[in-house]
Amino acid sequence: MKGLIWLTWRQHRWPIVISAAITVIFFVLMAITASDLGSMAAKCLTETAEQCQRKNTEAVPSHATYLMNSLVFLPVLVAVFWGVPLLAREFEQRTLPLAWSQDVSRGKWLAGKTTVMVMLIAAMGTVLAAESEHLAYQYHAYTSESLFEGTQFQAGGWLPLTLGLAWLAVGIAAGAATRRVLAAIAVVGGLWIVRMVGMVQLRPRFMTAVTVMKPYQLAKRDRSGPPVFTLSNDMGINSGSVPFVDAHGGTHSPMQVMDTWCGSADDMNACLHQHGIVGNLVKFQPAGRMGTFHLIENGMNLGLFVIALAVAWWCVRHTRTTVG
């Protein structure tokens, strides 16, 4: 095992060193940004609403969003620079027949090198996942944006850790199946796009959504649009088309209300009141389900991790010793 650890370090030392440096840099930046957001949120508690606008377009919240978005995409880089070369580069350089003809069997060779990589990614992923969750909570404390959707959800619940492990395994499997670095990278890229698009559609459907009528909080006159309500930490899944509800329970489309009835009204509140509009029919996942959703997605990531490693193992077991 010591020989495999040394071999893994010798062959992959630059990705390991660079990844460790990136981990430290990300951790420091996230810690500083989270501290700044916490100070800003605490300061806002002592100010009036007019003094503290809590805009996510400010410098510090924007930096937080950038860091969380970047963290979400790190797993695909793990797949490309850690997972793919493990087998694909060995196939291309025709070094596997020599390695597998020595005292170490192909199964032990794969298990040893994979174990070393998994442990390293797990260590780095744990550090980043813990701090990213802290950053997401501080971002929510200042901007009041929901922790249950978008980048904030993906930055929390230890998802960066399990996603990193899953895509390390995907990279290894892609390299084992294609035996070519560029082909494996193309496979990883395609699967990542499918995953990103698919999860956006699948995640809100993990459990049956709740539908309620959210009343408007009518206060001051507002000429810019209808009165606004908040969903706290819920996950809104109306996809931008939220039906309006009148006092009798009838529903009206946004096009009918905003374009036909009140699009040119000087007083939006008065227009809505005139047509009996009292709120919106909102479909959402309650904030209390966020932990369950994190568990479900973490389970999916770990399932992908196991399946990908099984594919890599099968490919290695059925590979001829002589590489054509």
Image (cartoon, helix red, strand yellow):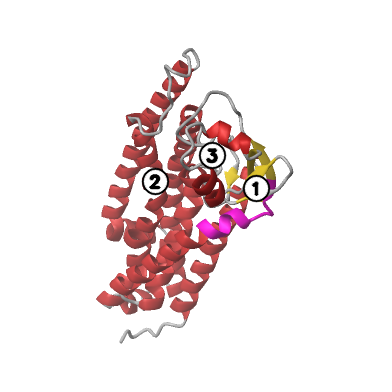
Q: Earlier in the sequence, mark 1 or mark 2?
A: 2
What residue is disc 2 on?
69
What residue is disc 1 on?
292
Which disc number belongs to residue 258? none
Q: Position of residue 297 (x, y in %)?
A: 57, 54
Q: Residue at x 35, y 30 (%)?
A: 58
Q: Residue at x 48, y 42 (%)?
A: 152
Range of magenta residues? 200-211
Neighbourhood count class around disc 1 (C-alpha, 10 Å): few under 14, some 14–19, many 20 upward: some
In the rendered image, the quadrant that contains the N terminus is bottom left
In 3D space, how far apart are the residues under numbered discs 3 and 2 (Cα atoms)?
14 Å
What residue is disc 3 on?
147
Q: Residue at x 46, y 65 (%)?
A: 111
What amino acid is found at the position of numbered circle 3 in the picture? Leu
Is residue 308 in view from this perspective?
A: yes
Question: Is 102 or 60 nearer to us in this picture?
Answer: 60
Quadrant housing residue 180:
bottom left
What amino acid is found at the position of numbered circle 1 in the picture? Thr
